[in-house]
Image (spheres, grey):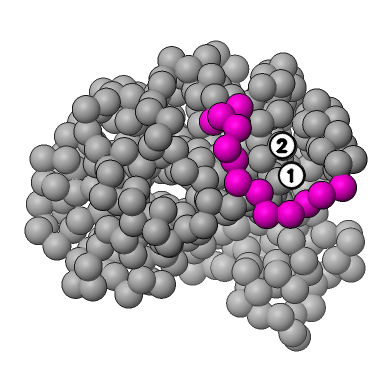
Amino acid sequence: MSLLGFREYLFGETEGLKLPCPDDELISMWIADMEFATAPTIVEALQKRVAHPIYGYTQTFDPAYKNAFLNWTQREYDWTFDLDHLVTSKGVIPALFALIEYICKADEKILIMTPSYAFFKHAADFNGLELVTSDLVLKDGDYQIDFDDLRQKAEDEKVKLCIFCSPHNPTGRVWRDDELEKFAKICLENEVQIISDEIHCDLLRVGAKFTPLAKLFADSDQIITCMAPSKTFNLAGFSFANIIIPNEVLRARWKERHLPIDNPLSIVAAQAAYETGAEWLGDLKIYLDENFSFLESYLQKHLPKAVFKRPGATYFAWINISAYFSLEENLTLFFANRAGVLLEGGNMFVSNSDGCIRLNLACPRVRLEEGLERIVKSLLENVNG
């Protein structure tokens, strides 16, 4: 992201914000991509395609890409779907903004669970729709769905869509099958359509299992599934996502409004990822698990009052440091000013998130250690005056 971009996104400012070190000395632990090179097999596939010097409008008539993605979901999650239901998008968030317009009328409402990825709220706001929130409940170290509250919110006849995050961002919860079933039944029984954002599904802890929501409701056409290679393989710059829309009417509307033209390099990168990236991803998961172990030990030693549990998925650590700060503190601004570390504080996750920070651990361990040292030093200096 550009320097202008991080200032505007994190602080709402582009001028006048003075940070304690030059931009190239800041440690970035906020944006959802990785400081790791993508899989060499993806680079090789891109180099081969670049050597063909025609980069014109590209439609995917060859079924190879769709089959590669289908084979991936079958191998990783034992889940298949009708390939006719698959469309592509410039990203999950652009798809979300569009789908809301196609699904909801002007006086209807959207339901999300909080804390929440902020763009779920932004998408509702952009479409001029009221947002209804159901707070997740922290119990035994895990964030859990408050099903009674969820049911009460879903029973509002104006609530027509629930944007669901699985695995959950920012907490990293991987929902169990029984939780998924109970959640979806509440929505579907109340005629609430579901968009399931599953963009982080591949980034599991070693040995963890993930179930696509739609796998449990194969007969329903009211669940839209969003997946992408962007987070998994550090390909976000290619702006490419898979959107599975089983409802014929909604899918027809999508196709009326979206030209079936993709960046030729995006197709090549995504196909190579799904065909050849499994071994690289396995190595990545091991490294990320070790980073989480490092973080756990570091917090236990230096910030024993911090509340953290290793997430089942994502490369995010969701840490409650409210024992060290007042809940009014802008943690994003504090750590930028005092530590030279860019991170996202709880105020950036809609609600039910005060006193928390989200750290991106998808970086070399030496970088992680330096970031944590800065965070702890600035925090303790503040506490000790």
Q: Residue at x 11, y 46 (%)?
A: 190
Residue type highlighted by circle 1: Leu
Per the image, is 62 magenta?
yes
Instruction: Describe residue 154's horizontal placement relative to residue 307 as left or right.
Output: left
Is 110 in front, or is 356? 110
**Is residue 385 in view?**
no
For the N terminus, give its image quadrant: bottom right
Q: Residue at x 71, y 37 (%)?
A: 268
Inter-mark Cα distance, 1 to 2: 5 Å
SS label for mark 2:
helix
For the C terminus, give its image quadrant: bottom right
**Is residue 220 in view?**
yes
Residue 265 is labelled as 1
Are the residues flagged by discs 1 and 2 in contact, CB closer than 8 Å?
yes
Q: Where is 136 relative to 216, above or below? A: below
Instruction: Describe residue 57's horizontal placement relative to residue 83 as left or right.
Output: right
Residue 233 is labelled as none
The magenta span reads: 53-66
Residue 268 is labelled as 2
Residue type highlighted by circle 2: Val
Quadrant of the rendered image containing residue 39? top right
Is 301 in front, or is 120? 120
Instruction: Describe residue 310's horizontal placement relative to residue 189 as left or right.
Output: right
**Where does the image place residue 314, in percent across and percent down from the top left?**
57, 35
Give the main secondary structure of the magenta stretch: loop
Q: Residue at x 78, y 51 (%)?
A: 55
Q: Residues within 10 Å of mark 1 (few under 14, many from 20)?
A: some
Q: Where is 78 relative to 229, above or below? A: above
SS label for mark 1:
helix
Q: Where is 270 relative to 130, above or below? A: above
**Where does the image place residue 377, in percent across and percent down from the top left?**
76, 52
